[in-house]
Amino acid sequence: MLSKRLLNFESFEVMDILSLAQKLEKEHKVIHLEIGEPDFNTPKSIVEEGIKSLKEGFTHYTDSRGILELREKISNLYKNKYKADINPDNIIITGGSSLGLFFALSSIIDEGDEVLIQNPSYPCYKNFIKFLGGKPVFCDFTVESLEKAISNKTKAIIINSPSNPLGEVVDKEIYEFAYEYIPYIISDEIYNGLVYEGKCYSAIEFDENLEKTILVNGFSKLYAMTGWRIGYVISNKKIIEGVLKLQQNLFISAPTMSQYAALKAFEKETEKEINNMIKEFNRRRKLVLKYVKYFGWKVNNPIAAYYVFSNIGEDGREFAYKLLKEKYVALTPGIGFGSKGKNCIRISYANSYENIKEGLKRIREFLDER
Ligand code: PLP
């Protein structure tokens, strides 16, 4: 018999759609607009550094905090970009930001604690919170809704900016409100850097001494390193000491070759490749928005990450499954991200321009034929 804790855990709807798409793929060309993973390969210099580290024998555990060189580079990045008061002791390298998020929540959540999350938001948040005995409280990210959602049990808020699934950034006033009234701010900044218009804040700009902030980031999205499983947590020393105990017990250390490979993410040549990737994402975003407007679907302001979350005016799950079965285009139903997503679908533009265009044309056909 599975534990009650695990029974409470929900599967990831995007994975269910993916497995159906993969079945259909045996006989049809399926266009994947569901997966939230860059189609680009990891920049060459990063790959080469990973291989070099293996050849040189860096195949052992590292310090549980992560190698000092990488923590120094991350620390310098936040110091230079945001003038934060940070040093390598404020950082721990984790097996992807997923593990970082789980560690962040584990370090502060007690039974019955409430955590505010945006409706809609990344599905793992509610699962992790429940798994730890906490209570996810969905709300809109407006000051008015946050005021209503706060209680004396509120322990934290998770801010995800840029956001999955919305592809939007969170306003300054939300950070200001959170820092004034909520004990901890967990800031998932995994899409930081993938911003095509306007400004995206980092939580560290509101809390230079990291008193309330647990910032989670990683290399998966901006550096196309999903398979390397490497991320990090930044916080005050007390939280980091707590996370360190979890890391030692659960994971020992992040993958060694990935830590060495990630050192190259900070080099000029990598920056060039990343900038080209960002330009291409923006080109695809404009294409998706052009079609979505033509379809008459509603969107807010998708200016970041690689998602367009759109209200299609009918049940998103039914639509997505029907579209996949009839036109072989995979989209993610919005409901998995929260009740507000019921009539929505998420389009991921982490696929080639040509494939996206083909997928959008098939959606147009599907709509025209009804
Ligand atoms: N946070 C958000 C909002 C995500 O969308 C994802 C992955 O899709 C993650 C965290 C996990 O990323 P990783 O564990 O690869 O760093």
Image: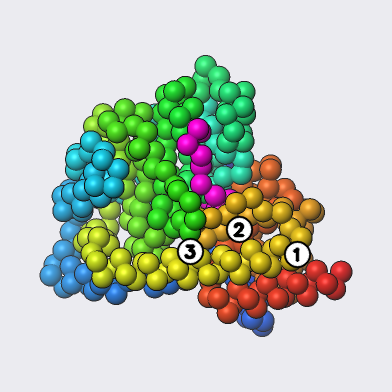
| Residue 308: numbered disc | 2
Q: Is 166 colored magenta in this rendering? A: yes
Q: Is 288 colored magenta in this rendering? A: no
Kindly tell me whether residue 304 is visible in this rendering.
Answer: yes
Above or below for 105 versus 112: below
| Ligand 1 is within 8 Å of the C-beta of the residue at disc 3 | yes
Which residue is rendered at x = 12% and y = 70% of the image?
Answer: 56
Element on which disc 2 rests: strand
Label 2 crowd (10 A; few <14 / some 14-19 / many >=20): many
Task: Write down the residue under mark 1.
Answer: 295
- Dot in front, 1 or 3: 1
Magenta span of residues: 164-174
Classify residue 363 by image quadrant.
bottom right
Hey, what amino acid is under mark 3? Glu
Q: Earlier in the sequence, mark 2 or mark 1?
A: 1
Label 1 crowd (10 A; few <14 / some 14-19 / many >=20): some
Label 3 crowd (10 A; few <14 / some 14-19 / many >=20): some
Hey, what amino acid is under mark 1? Phe
| Residue 37: numbered disc | 3
Element on which disc 3 rests: loop
Q: Is residue 174 left or right of residue 340?
A: left
Hey, what amino acid is under mark 2? Val
Q: Earlier in the sequence, mark 3 or mark 2?
A: 3
Name the residue nearer the viewer: 328 or 5. Answer: 328
Could you tell me residue 7's position as x and y percent?
Answer: 58, 42
Distance of label 3 from label 2 (alpha carbons): 14 Å
Which residue is rendered at x = 26% and y = 40% of the image?
Answer: 83
Which residue is rendered at x = 41% and y = 52% of the image?
Answer: 192
Above or below for 264 versus 3: below
